[in-house]
C-alpha cells in the first residue's frame, strides 16, 4: 500500500458534525496540521468525504 500525507487547509466552522468527526478520525484537529496514513479503502472514503477541506499528497 502507498502512503499519503493529508493536510487540513480549510476550517471546520459551519461544517456538518460528520465532517468534523471524519477529520478527527484522520487525526487532524486544526488548519495546517498534517498526518501520514496508509492508503486503505477506509482512508480513501474518509478523504473523499472531506476533500474540500484538505490537501492530499502521495508519498
Image (tube, helix red, strand yellow):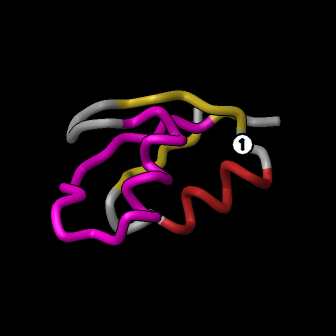
Badge 1 density bin: few <14, some 14–19, many ≥20, Cα 10 Å: some
Q: Is residue 30 left or right of residue 41?
A: left
Q: Quadrant of residue 17?
A: bottom left
Relative to 42, 18 lies left or right = left
Please report the residue visible at 50 percent of the width from the left and 53 percent of the height from the top.
Answer: 22
User: In this picture, is 28 found above or below 20?
Assistant: above
Report the residue at 56% width, 66% height from top. 48
- Snapshot quadrant of residue 2: top right
Q: Nearer the viewer, residue 49 or 4?
A: 49
Range of magenta residues: 4-28
Residue 9, magenta (yes or no): yes
Q: How many marks?
A: 1
Q: Is residue 2 above or below residue 20?
A: above
Label 1: which residue? 39
- Does 3 appear in magenta? no
Q: Residue at x 45, y 52 (%)?
A: 21
Helix, strand or loop status at disc 1: loop
Residue 26 appears at what percent x and percent y?
52, 40
Q: Position of residue 49 (x, y in %)?
A: 52, 68
Amino acid at each position: 500500500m502507498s502512503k499519503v500525507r493529508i493536510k487540513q487547509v480549510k476550517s471546520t466552522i459551519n461544517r456538518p458534525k460528520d465532517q468534523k468527526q471524519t477529520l478527527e478520525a484522520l487525526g487532524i484537529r486544526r488548519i495546517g496540521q498534517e498526518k501520514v496514513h496508509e492508503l486503505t479503502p477506509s482512508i480513501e472514503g474518509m478523504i473523499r468525504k472531506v476533500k474540500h477541506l484538505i490537501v492530499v499528497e502521495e508519498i
